[in-house]
Image (cartoon, rainbow, N blue to C red):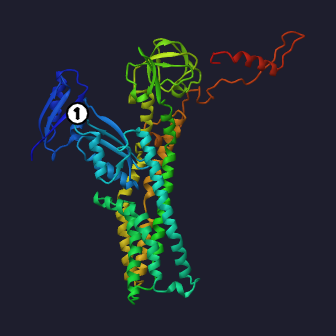
Amino acid sequence: MSAKILTLPITGMTCANCAMTIERNVKKLPGITDVQVNYANENATISYEAVTTGISEINAAITRAGYGITATNIHLPITGMTCANCAATIERVLNRMEGVLSAQVNYANESAEITFIPTVTDQKSLIHAIEKAGYGVAGTDREDLSAEEAVDVARHEEILKQSRKFWVGVAFTLPLFLFSMLRDFQLIGEWAFQWWAPWFMMILATPVQFYVGADYYLHGFQSLRNKSANMDVLVAMGSSVAYFFSVVTAVFLASGNSSLGGHVYFETAAMIITLIKLGKLLEVQAKGKTGSALKKLIGLQVKTARLTGPDGEKEIRIEQVKTGDILLIKPGEKIPLDGEIVSGYSSVDESMLTGESLPVEKSSGDAVVGATVNLNGSLTIKVTKTGEDTVLANIVRMVRQAQGSKPPIQRLADRVAAYFVPIVITIAILVFFVWLLSGAGLTAALLRLTAVLVIACPCALGLATPTAVMVGTGIGAARGILFKNGETLENARDITHLVFDKTGTITYGKPEVKEVVPTPISSEQVLTADEILEIAASVERVSEHPL
């Protein structure tokens, strides 16, 4: 087999000996045929046999030697996942890709955090791999939207889709269920037992089975194609057993053969799909609410900035601002991006960053942070950081990574979920044969098979922990508490002592008048507490002092 050639950007080298050290350590790996490390351009060109070793082993060898590989982190909003096994499938596909160092997919917030080597693979290839696995990435067809806007649009469309399918299911399932139950309990006349009754029920059940339940067939097939089994496989199998058994029974009855009995189970298949579709709708709506704290953080970012130059002032979108641009911030406005004051003097409210409610005096040469509020003077600043490099962007990234990370308990749940569906299918088949061989009959055995398949859907297993991590880290971020990752949040249960920053944490963070004590001006003139407050308010009304 021909060797693969890999070019890696190296960090941490300080001299030519560093390059030799990396070469020596990488050559120790099995399957390495050649290593050339260039100190001048900080690149390593490695020839290796992919069957024997891989990028992860090469990366580990370079890291052990005390150096690093330049890697890029991206956040991708994923669409089309229906259970924790879908997230596991995408993770497996991404982690197998050449150039991907790590990939974590969170089912609760429908996103993927991927670390990859930009010289080996790129974002387009990652998206293609996700789409090939049968899933999607929000916003790939809407370049006019930001990543967060694309997620909101995709989630809104998903809610509309699930709502539409649920109500179509209700429209067909409700009359089918009522007709079937009234017929079974013989509460309606003999007309309900005519030859056409099973066909009437099939007409009502078919749109539910193949329109409302189409997602379960599609995603179930994609799951099996990816050599895994998810919740959709169970739902598709359970409802299909009830539906197709009923179709065969209806055909037998129409031909005068009652060997399969006279009962059909179209309402069972329709109820299974409609009720699970209701659960899916509630789940999608809940996912939209769990990310509200992160949206508040993102909402702190202003949308436009006032650019100043030789041609005067003009308002531009925040995405158009470049490092080195000069911006004007008027009193009461938010500072758009991180920068350095060129001219002006003002007080700046930095409470969103520090928790300190008292404004900070700022003048020429001082640094300012984006999303803080300029209070009482005009400032001209030179932009030093834009986009993903700003302080606010780093806070958002940290919260997002914490929400996407997996604590130990979730990794355990994911491992269980991976084996859960195959075990359930095995148990269902065993139940079927036990009932069939016990003499209960084919119909009774099929009903038990369907019950085991449908009732064992592992949604809660894979959804509970990531949802708890999302809500916990989100609420913490909204209150100024940042968790590095999900494991930190899980370990917080063992905390025995807390050390607080007093201001804004165990105090309100805002000065307030607690008591007014009148002092006589003279023996003839005594002011009441209300009169003192009135005078103080009159003076304060025109004051720019923070207090």
Viewer-side residue, 64 vs 46: 46
Q: Where is residue 215 in the image (x, y as percent from the top left)?
A: 39, 60
Answer left or right for 404 relative to 360.
left
Looking at the image, residue 78 sits to the left or right of residue 531; the answer is left
Would residue 402 be visible to someone looking at this image? no
Residue at x 41%, y 47% (from the top left corner): 110
Judge whether 430 appears above or below 442 on screen.
Answer: above
Q: Which type of secondary structure does the marked residue at label 1 adopt?
A: helix
In terms of image quadrants, where is residue 18?
top left
Instruction: Examine the image and state in which quarter residue 47 appears.
Output: top left
Q: Which residue lies furthest to the top in this view?
A: 522
Disc 1 marks which amino acid?
Answer: Ile
Density class for disc 1 (Cα within 10 Å; few <14, some 14-19, many ≥20) is: many
x 77%, y 17%: residue? 535
User: What's the residue at 35%, 49% (across, down)?
Assistant: 136
Closest to the observer, 152 or 298: 152
Location of residue 290 with respect to 508 vertically, above or below = below
Question: Residue 41: x percent and y percent?
Answer: 19, 25
Q: Is residue 21 visible?
A: yes
Viewer-side residue, 441 vs 547: 547
Q: How many marks?
A: 1
**Which residue occupies 69% across, 18% down?**
541
User: In x, y percent, where is residue 150?
Assistant: 42, 43
Q: Does 471 sit above or below residue 330?
A: below
If the image is split into quadrants, where does the C terminus sit? top right
Give the farthest residue toward the bottom. 256
Q: Mark 1 points at which residue?
A: 62
